[in-house]
Amino acid sequence: MQLLVSCDYLISPANCSHSDLASCIESLIFIKRDLESGSPQVIIEDNSLTKLDNMGCFPCASIFNYNLQGFEEFEFSGRDIARTVNNILSMEPMEQNRLPECVAEWKDRSVTPLLMGSTEERTGVICSLLEEISLAKRFFEKNYSILHHPVDSTQHQIAIKGAIESFLPETADNFPLDLHETFSIYTAYKTFASNLDGFSLYQKANTEYEYKSAFFVGTMVILCNRGMELSSLKWENFSLGNHFLKSLSENQCISDHNFSHVCFDVICHMLAGVPKYDCDPFYTGTNRTEQRTKDGKLAWRTHITKGNPALRLMYWTEKSGEIELANVGKKNDLLIC
């Protein structure tokens, strides 16, 4: 599933609550992070900078400072937000981060409910954008959701219906062709991510960023399923130690190996604060009186498997609550990296 970010979203919603604005800015940071990593999950609306300029909403510090009025204490300044947005817009999208090029002749097209833009003119442009998305979904087997503002709080899906009289590039379909597609619509990146398949991302992961993203998604799914607040999970809440990925490979905990799913599940539950098994201190010796420490961090371990081999997850915790995933090892291993 890919998330198409409308250019309306990039200018930070005005006239919203402190929490909504904070969620929007957090989403922009996630979007920037994904694009920088080469992730295929995010697509930015084509020609967004030109469209924003035409709307009189060029992403500069002054427009974001205007939206921040009334919030005396806020983590980010207008300049910070402008820098993030312009970094997003300055990236040259890869092919995987673009909508496929196509054109169609429509008849009796309808959009329900109508997705509003920041201006009346933008509403018409968004309808055209929805056409492009629906065509890509139907003819190129793509799967899209939309990140947009403004969105009614009761609005979760958009449906587009119509008849396609002709289509380019040419296909084997017979025209006219009835089309009916629906898309999920989100106001926060985290809500979108909580609907992804974290384990599928984990199985495909190759880089540290991809592994961390998979754990992040898997943890959000658990929080969501338990009715817990997604805001409690921050990207900075956890990190991967230098030897962690190597230990996953050495203990058959990656890709489609024997213990990949159970390992992923145990880690995500631990990060969500609802561990599958007891999390016990990792002691310095057999007398079990002194917990191991490193640079002020405390050592812990918990079960991954209880059979043969009996695998354990080792990790460190900071006083602030941040977690470093150290390594996976067998039951009698006395090593925490």
Image (spheres, helix red, strand yellow):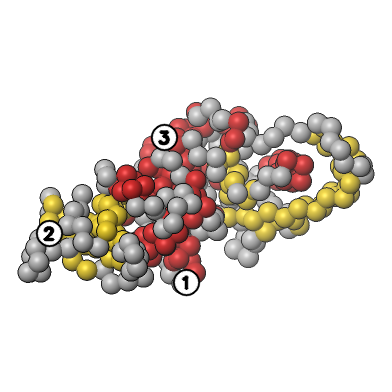
Task: Give x and y (percent) for residue 174.
Answer: 91, 42
Of tags 1 and 2, the one toward the viewer is 2
Q: Residue at x 18, y 66 (%)?
A: 281
Report which residue position mark 2 lands on: 292
Q: Residue at x 38, y 39 (%)?
A: 80
Report which residue position mark 1 lands on: 227
Of tags 1 and 3, the one toward the viewer is 1
Mark 2 and mark 3 in contact (Cβ < 8 Å)? no
Label 1 and label 3: CA atoms lie apart by 34 Å
Image height of 224 relative to 109, above or below: below
Report which residue position mark 3 lands on: 83
| Residue 115 in the figure: left or right of residue 307 | right
Label 3 and label 2: CA atoms lie apart by 42 Å
Secondary structure of the residue carrying tag 1 is loop
Q: Residue at x 65, y 61 (%)?
A: 155
Q: Earlier in the sequence, mark 1 or mark 3?
A: 3
Label 1 and label 2: CA atoms lie apart by 34 Å
Mark 3 and mark 1 in contact (Cβ < 8 Å)? no
Task: Give x and y (percent) for residue 56.
Answer: 58, 35
Q: Earlier in the sequence, mark 1 or mark 2?
A: 1
Q: Quarter-wise, where is residue 30 in the image?
A: top left
Q: Amino acid at mark 2?
A: Arg
| Residue 285 in the figure: left or right of residue 6 | left
Secondary structure of the residue carrying tag 2 is loop
